[in-house]
Structures are given as C-alpha cells and as structure tokens.
Image (cartoon, rainbow, N blue to C red):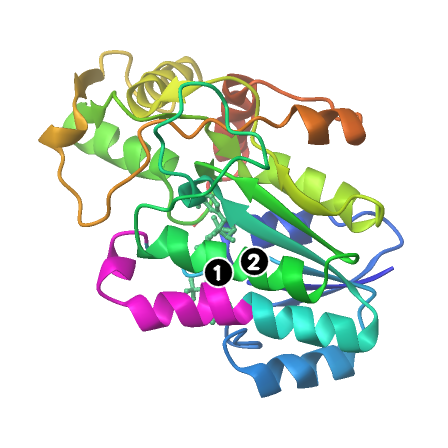
Amino acid sequence: MKVLITGAQGQVGRCLLASAPAGVTVAGLGRAQLDVGDGDAVQRAIETHQPSVIINAAAYTAVDRAETEVDAARRVNGLGPRHLAWAAAACGARLVHISTDFVFDGRASVPYPPEAPTAPLGVYGRSKLEGEQAVLELLPAASVVVRTAWVYAAHGANFMRTMLRVMAEKGQVRVVADQIGTPTAADSLAAVLWVLASRPEVTGRQHFTDAGVASWYDFAVAIAEEAAALGLLPADVQVQAIGTADYPTPARRPGYSVLDKRALVAALALQHRHWRVSLRRVLGTLIAAPKA
Ligand SMILES: NC(=O)c1ccc[n+]([C@@H]2O[C@H](COP(=O)([O-])OP(=O)(O)OC[C@H]3O[C@@H](n4cnc5c(N)ncnc54)[C@H](OP(=O)(O)O)[C@@H]3O)[C@@H](O)[C@H]2O)c1
C-alpha cells in the first residue's frame, strides 16, 4: 500500500506519520509541500507519488477566524477535498477524508448518527460540509468521510495544551460547561484512519471519537487531575464552570455534538477507549518527551 498524507504537519497528520503500519510506503506532505487548495499541485503530487490511498488531514481549522476568512476556509476545506477526490478518481486511489462534528447545529440531545441531517452554525462547519459532499459525490465507491470532534495531541494547538499552559501560569481557569462533546486523542483517530486505509469496503459517512461524553469544563477538570497525578501541574489548580454566554466567540459552536460511532466501532471491531484513558496516555507522553 502506498499512502499519501496531506496536512502531514498537523495534529492528526503527525500522529499518522508516527503510527504508519509496517510495510506501508508513506509520503507525508505538509502545507509547504502540497497546498490542497491548488488543483494543479494536487494533480502533480498524485502523479508523482501514485498512491493507492490518500488520507486528507489538511484543513483550515481556525474556527473563529474562518468567520472573517470565508474564502480561505472554503479554499482548503471545500475545494481541497474536491481536488483530492478528482485526483484520486483519475489514479484509482481510495480517499480517506476527515470531517467534523461542526456540520451539526448541536440541538440534539442524543448522539448524532452519520445519517443525521446537517445544519452547520458557522463558516468552518459549512466549509467542511462542502468538502465532505464533494468527496462523496465525486468518489462514492472509493472514499470514506470520518467525522470526529475535539481533537488534541501532545503537539500542536489544542485545548489540552492551552489548559496546561494557563493552569501552570495562573493556577486557575474558567471553562465553558454547557457545550457537550467528546475529547478525542489524535492518535486514537490516526489508528482508526490506518484501519480504514486498508478496508475499501467501508465507505460513506462514518463517525469516530474516543468513547464517553464531557463538557469542556469536565475535560479541563480531568486535565488538571491527570496532570497533577503525573506531576505536570500542582494539585491545587482551580477550574471554574462558566456558560457559553460568559465566553463570547466570533463563531457559534454546537451545544451538543456527541457523535454516534457504534456503526464504525462494530464494522472495524475497534477497541474503543474512553476519552479519559486516552487523555492519561497523551499526558504520559509529555513526561517522557515534552513536545514543541
Ligand atoms: N482539531 C479539532 O478539534 C478537530 C475537530 C473535528 C474535526 N477536525 C478535523 O480533523 C482534521 C485534522 O485536524 P487537526 O486537528 O490535525 O488540525 P491541524 O492541527 O490544524 O492540522 C491541519 C493541517 O493542515 C494544514 N493546512 C492548512 N491549509 C492547508 C492547505 N491549503 N494545504 C495543505 N495543508 C494545509 C495546516 O497547516 P498550517 O498549520 O501551516 O496552517 C495543518 O498542518 C481536519 O480535517 C479537521 O477539520 C479537527
């Protein structure tokens, strides 16, 4: 199997590179090597590398900035997947594409199944929906779209790292308690993406996050507790629950975006870990080797 990974310097991209299965030839291209918004460049990269599988981990992920950078978000999240789907169709490759819980409006009170109606609240969610629709239209039999949520890793820009920094600097933090979802370790997702790379019969929309449910407040409390247990933070960090209304952001976010992933977990016979188990694992890697 020859696999081309786009967005290879991102949270998920880096985890994919670090966990490539033995025997797989991997070309990991960061934004500097391949701009997925450039159709000609995508074509050239596919011709050069002749992959049998493309994993698209490239995305414009600045949710708030997207509200004012609409074209930039659409170029990467909408056009990028379209270019990759065209190129994959031309060379007979399978495309594994990542999407988001932000395609939903968050009004549900039970987990969203993959076929639930979409209604994004902002530019980022709309641009991601555009991308997933392009992939499924252009390459229905040779693609899979994996929606995920609340991704974090030991590297990159994410909630866990922000919390660790603020907690260490200030000893206290206020965190939104009325948005509910599932924290998902980028390496948990990467493992599933690798399984999907070699399972061409799994197509269409799929959902994957770690198991369980949390508010951002719950996630922050767990970060404080687990980090203190590992000696990464003092034990007396204060986490205060606030409401979304107390923390206004340019982009609206879904209030409830838990994804129903039972179908994918069953289809792939996954060992599905609770988000807190994953959090402990990721924090543990910070002790072994602090990452930039
Ligand atoms: N992070 C989350 O909480 C979350 C939640 C749900 C779904 N997702 C989805 O998960 C996937 C992976 O996200 P992530 O968390 O790994 O995000 P990330 O850390 O922001 O990584 C995205 C990577 O894509 C690169 N990129 C941006 N524009 C590009 C372009 N035009 N061409 C090629 N690469 C480009 C970025 O480079 P620069 O850093 O140089 O811009 C970055 O390295 C994305 O599809 C995202 O939408 C993420």
Residue 263, picture quadrant: top right
Instruction: Please say if 241 is above or below 161.
Output: above
Instruction: Please say if 18 is above or below 168.
Output: below
Look at 62% across and 34% down and name the residue there: 188
Number of the label disc, if any, that sits on residue 223: none
| Residue 76 visible (yes or no) | yes
SS class of the residue under badge 1? Answer: helix
Residue corresponding to mark 1: 130
Image quarter of the N terminus: bottom right
Q: Distance of mark 2 from mark 1, alpha carbons?
A: 5 Å
Q: Amino acid at mark 2?
A: Gln
Cβ(mark 2) to ligand 1 < 8 Å? no
Q: Is residue 79 magenta?
A: yes
Please rate how many residues cluster around mark 2, counting C-alpha atoms within 10 Å: few if below 14, some from 14 to 19, many from 20: some
Residue 140, picture quadrant: bottom right
Report the side of 181 relative to 17 (left or right). Answer: left
Please provide the residue range marked out in magenta.
Answer: 63-80
Please rate how many residues cluster around mark 1, counting C-alpha atoms within 10 Å: few if below 14, some from 14 to 19, many from 20: some
Q: Amino acid at mark 1?
A: Glu
Look at 22% across and 26% down and name the residue there: 176
Indicate the position of residue 99 as horizontal and vertical percent values.
53, 49
SS class of the residue under badge 2? Answer: helix
Indicate the position of residue 147 as horizontal and vertical percent values.
56, 42
Residues at marks 2 and 1 touching, judged by CB atoms closer than 8 Å? yes
Who is closer to the viewer here, 188 or 261? Answer: 261
Indicate the position of residue 190 as horizontal and vertical percent values.
65, 43
Residue corresponding to mark 2: 133
